[in-house]
């Protein structure tokens, strides 16, 4: 038997042992969707998460949603009403952000390899471009001049440090992201000299960290770096986007990040900030932490078999929807995501089984030798922490099984 990650707090069952999501029975939701597999997102959990963040963080810090974590249209509309801005990473995400009701002035567009038509769409709409290079800056200025629009431009900084203990390092050393810190002051001077509406700095050092002290330390370094660059550039940044980094517990032994501790430390950091940042606004941009926990992936057992003494529950889902749970999205060692049988939620395990998907590849494993109650053909398996980097981050065209259904409740 191998352990699985912790089931997020807040999920309960009805008297019959059926998992409830947003107060609704999982089997009823699957019926309403028409078929499995299905992602269900709990709107009340999304709302509670934003409230938790606001209670923890200093009032002066704004909250941006990094929509690449989950761009499902109803979820975006739900988030647009609650957060202060969206961070997008493609022209397609830009269109989705604007369609969700978020105002363009509160949309920022980061990411390498922006094409001219994407830069043009952002500039024409009045969104902020987080510039990834000097070359991109040149193209944005030229497009602004051609359109007769003053472009809103921030500089994404490749910091000289990274977020310790983060699952995905986005800064430190040679990176495709951002402009090396040493080159930033000259670029800011050039943007301002060219008449651009300079919006400040975007400094994103890493993702999926659970250690509040490491996040706090990175944020302190980020604020110090922003102050140094502002002084060297001789300009006050209107906005300092501090990045994100707050992760969620996926695996055995993971413990939720202490958001209150991050907020307390950030309050101290900002209270002691350099005078050059006295009038700056600050923002954090979060994807995973805001939406992962609210999502459950429901997949149905279509076959139960034994091979060489091992029991397999074969489901109608798989890595084509939940690549990360199969261990093939940025993890080195495969470990089990939180998993349960939806119809026997909270019931003591009686057997060790491997839950696999319907794709004809050994990579398609959703639970490896996990202890579960007895699972029969027709039962629903629930994979938790499925609200971020699930449906949109998985190869849904692989093997022709088609995309998963999605539902916000
Ligand atoms: C991916 C990304 C995020 C979101 O990261 P999470 O770990 O999901 O919070 C934020 N900002 C940028 C620039 C990103 O690329």
Image (cartoon, helix red, strand yellow):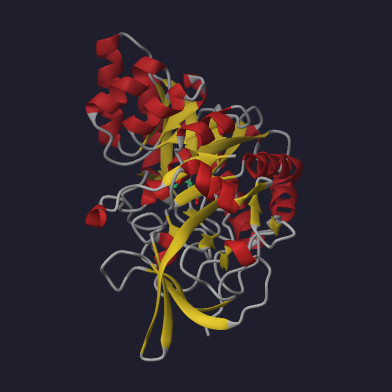
Q: Is residue 114 above or below residue 205?
A: above
Residue 293 visible (yes or no): no
Q: Is residue 35 above or below residue 121?
A: below
Q: Is residue 94 above or below residue 228?
A: above
In percent of width and height, residue 333 lies at 42, 75
Q: Residue at x 46, y 60 (%)?
A: 300
In percent of width and height, residue 87 lies at 47, 35
**Nearest the eye: 274 or 331:** 331
Q: Residue at x 74, y 47 (%)?
A: 268
Q: Is residue 294 left or right of residue 369?
A: right
Instruction: Quadrant for residue 258, please give it.
Output: bottom right
In percent of width and height, residue 195 lies at 38, 16
Instruction: Quadrant for residue 218, please give it.
Output: bottom right
**Nearest the eye: 397 or 71:** 397
Point out the residue furthest to the bottom here. 308
Q: Is residue 187 left or right of residue 259?
A: left
Residue 44 visible (yes or no): yes
**Nearest the eye: 339 or 95:** 339
Image quadrant where one finds the C terminus: top right
In percent of width and height, residue 267 lies at 73, 44
User: How many numbered dots are placed on residues in this image?
Assistant: 0
Point out the residue furthest to the top here. 148
Q: Residue at x 47, y 20 (%)?
A: 104
Q: Residue at x 52, y 72 (%)?
A: 375
**Nearest the eye: 104 or 36:** 36
């Amino acid at each position: 038997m191998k352990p699985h990650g912790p089931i997020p707090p807040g999920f309960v069952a009805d008297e019959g042992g059926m998992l409830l999501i947003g107060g609704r029975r999982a089997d009823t939701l699957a019926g309403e969707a028409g078929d499995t597999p299905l992602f269900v997102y709990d709107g009340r959990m999304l709302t509670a998460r934003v409230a938790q963040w606001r209670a923890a963080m200093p009032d002066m810090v704004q909250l941006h949603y990094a929509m690449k974590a989950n761009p499902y249209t109803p979820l975006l509309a739900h988030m647009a009403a609650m957060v202060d801005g969206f961070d997008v990473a493609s022209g397609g995400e830009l269109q989705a952000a604007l369609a969700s009701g978020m105002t363009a002035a509160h949309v920022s567009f980061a990411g390498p390899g922006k094409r001219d038509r994407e830069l043009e769409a952002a500039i024409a709409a009045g969104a902020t471009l987080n510039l990834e290079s000097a070359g991109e800056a040149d193209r944005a200025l030229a497009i602004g001049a051609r359109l007769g629009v003053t472009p809103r431009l921030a500089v994404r900084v490749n910091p000289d440090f990274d977020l310790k203990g983060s699952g995905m390092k986005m800064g430190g050393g040679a990176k495709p992201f951002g402009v090396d810190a040493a080159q930033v002051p000259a670029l800011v001077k050039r943007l301002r000299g060219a008449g651009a509406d300079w919006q400040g700095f975007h400094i994103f050092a890493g993702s999926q960290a659970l250690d509040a002290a490491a996040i706090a330390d990175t944020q302190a370094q980020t604020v110090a770096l922003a102050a140094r660059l502002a002084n060297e550039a001789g300009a006050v940044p209107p906005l300092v986007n501090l990045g994100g980094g707050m992760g969620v517990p996926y695996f055995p032994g993971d413990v939720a990040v202490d958001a209150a501790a991050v907020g307390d430390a950030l309050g101290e950091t900002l209270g002691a900030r350099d005078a050059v940042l006295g009038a700056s606004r600050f923002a954090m941009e979060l994807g995973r932490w805001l939406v992962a926990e609210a999502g459950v992936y429901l997949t149905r057992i279509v076959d139960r078999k034994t091979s060489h003494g091992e029991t397999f529950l074969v489901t109608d889902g798989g890595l084509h929807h939940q690549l990360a749970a199969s261990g093939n999205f940025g993890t080195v060692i495969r470990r089990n995501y939180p998993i349960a049988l939806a119809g026997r939620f909270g019931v003591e395990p009686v057997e060790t089984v491997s839950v696999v998907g319907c794709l004809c590849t050994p990579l398609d494993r959703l639970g490896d030798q996990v202890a579960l109650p007895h699972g029969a053909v027709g039962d629903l398996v629930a994979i938790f922490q499925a609200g971020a980097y699930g449906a949109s981050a998985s190869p849904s065209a692989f093997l022709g099984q088609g995309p998963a259904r999605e539902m916000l409740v």
